[in-house]
Each structure stands twice: as structure tokens, then as C-alpha cells.
Image (spheres, rainbow, N blue to C red):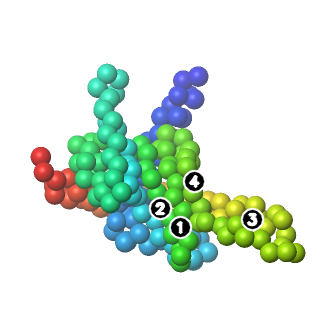
């Protein structure tokens, strides 16, 4: 039973590191990423980020939301040692956009929204076409998320991970330094 708890704790830390890395890298690259197949797509964290710090009775959670928010309070939370525990992620390629909330503790996806599917059917169209397109769009979102996580794991296991950590810490410090006290 103790091993299961330790494994869960490691998953939480890995998930928090992933979301923090993703936020940092999405800002540093202007949101530009590529899939393993080389396809370009955009990824940004926006509108809702949850940061958490402390333990037990001293556990503090800050949920920052806003349609056009720069998420300043969440950034300040990172600068004070809090970790990203949940984030709204927007994915885009060409004119198509997806949004999904990702939880760090178990990598659960919530509220996955795909691009709109045209509902109009013409005579002779396959009645399953709408469902098949929806599944295709879900698969695309998973491909983008898998690509992001693969890039994170490759960075995490690379010999220059300490340099990446330094970059993320500098990003956090610069984010928190620009905020009013």
C-alpha cells in the first residue's frame, strides 16, 4: 500500500513539472510545437490555472481565471513555491481549436472541446460520418497532448535537464518579479 502512495506522489510531481514546463515553453516559443510526425500546432495555457503549495493544514490553493487574463496571480504563486495542479490548455492547428483541462495528479482530461462539426447532412451521406469525424478530432487532440508529453519526457531524461530547470526557474522569477506585491 505504501508503494502505491509513493507512486501516486511521484505522478503528482511529474504532472506538476509537466504543466509548469508546458506553460514556460508555450510562452517561450509563442505556443509553437510540432508532433512526432513534424506537424506544427499551437499550445497555450489560458483562462484558468490552479496552483497549490504547502501541506496538510497549510495547504494553499489559488485558482486564477479570466477570459483575457495574463494569469498574474498564478505566476506569482509559482514564484512563491506553488506548483501548477490544473490548467486549461488550448490547442490549435490551422483554423481548428481544441480546449481541455488537464489535472497534474492523474493526467485526467476534463471538458475536452473539439472544433465544431458541421451538422448538415446531405442525402446519401454516411449516417456515421459525424461520429467518425468527432472521433477523428478526439484522436487529433490526443496526438497533440501525447506529443507535448513526449517532448517533456525527452527533455526530462536528457543530460541537459538541469539547464532546462534553470530556464524554467528564470521564467518563474521573471514572471513573479513583474507582479505588484
In the rendering, at what x and y percent does residue 70 appear? 29, 58
Q: CA distance from mark 2 to mark 3?
A: 23 Å
Q: Is there CB contact under 8 Å for labels 2 and 3? A: no
Q: Is residue 168 visible?
A: no
Q: Is there CB contact under 8 Å for labels 4 and 1? A: no
- Looking at the image, which residue is at 52% across and 54% down? 100
Numbered badge on residue 97: 1
**Is disc 3 placed on a helix, strand or loop?**
helix
Q: Residues within 10 Å of mark 2 (few under 14, many from 20)?
A: many
Q: Which residue is mark 4?
A: 112
In the rendering, at what x and y percent does residue 49 appear? 38, 49
**Is disc 1 placed on a helix, strand or loop?**
strand
Tell me how many marks there are.
4
Q: CA distance from mark 3 to mark 1?
A: 17 Å
Q: Is residue 98 visible?
A: yes
Q: Is there CB contact under 8 Å for labels 2 and 1? A: yes
Q: Which residue is mark 2?
A: 90
Q: Residue furthest right?
A: 124
Name the front one of labels 2 and 3. 3
Name the front one of labels 3 and 1. 3
In the rendering, at what x and y percent does residue 33 appear? 48, 71
**Is disc 2 placed on a helix, strand or loop?**
strand
- Looking at the image, which residue is at 57% across and 77% down? 38
Q: CA distance from mark 3 to mark 4?
A: 17 Å
**Mark 4 or mark 1, which has the lower sequence index?**
1
Image quarter (top left, top right, bottom left or bottom right) of the N terminus: top right
Numbered badge on residue 130: 3
Amino acid at each position: 500500500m505504501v508503494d502505491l502512495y509513493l507512486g501516486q506522489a511521484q505522478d503528482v510531481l511529474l504532472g506538476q513539472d509537466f504543466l509548469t514546463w508546458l506553460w514556460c515553453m508555450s510562452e517561450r516559443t509563442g505556443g509553437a510545437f510540432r508532433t512526432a510526425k513534424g506537424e506544427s500546432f499551437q499550445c497555450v495555457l489560458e483562462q484558468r490555472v490552479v496552483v497549490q503549495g504547502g501541506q496538510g493544514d497549510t495547504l494553499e490553493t489559488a485558482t486564477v481565471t479570466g477570459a483575457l487574463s495574463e494569469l498574474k496571480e498564478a505566476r506569482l504563486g509559482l514564484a512563491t513555491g506553488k506548483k501548477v495542479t490544473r490548467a486549461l490548455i488550448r490547442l490549435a492547428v490551422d483554423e481548428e481549436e481544441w480546449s481541455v483541462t488537464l489535472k497534474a495528479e492523474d493526467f485526467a482530461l476534463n471538458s475536452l472541446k473539439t472544433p465544431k462539426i458541421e451538422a448538415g447532412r446531405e442525402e446519401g451521406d454516411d449516417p456515421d460520418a459525424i461520429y467518425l469525424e468527432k472521433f477523428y478530432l478526439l484522436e487529433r487532440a490526443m496526438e497533440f497532448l501525447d506529443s507535448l508529453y513526449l517532448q517533456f519526457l525527452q527533455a526530462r531524461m536528457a543530460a541537459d535537464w538541469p539547464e532546462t530547470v534553470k530556464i524554467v526557474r528564470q521564467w518563474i522569477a521573471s514572471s513573479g518579479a513583474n507582479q505588484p506585491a
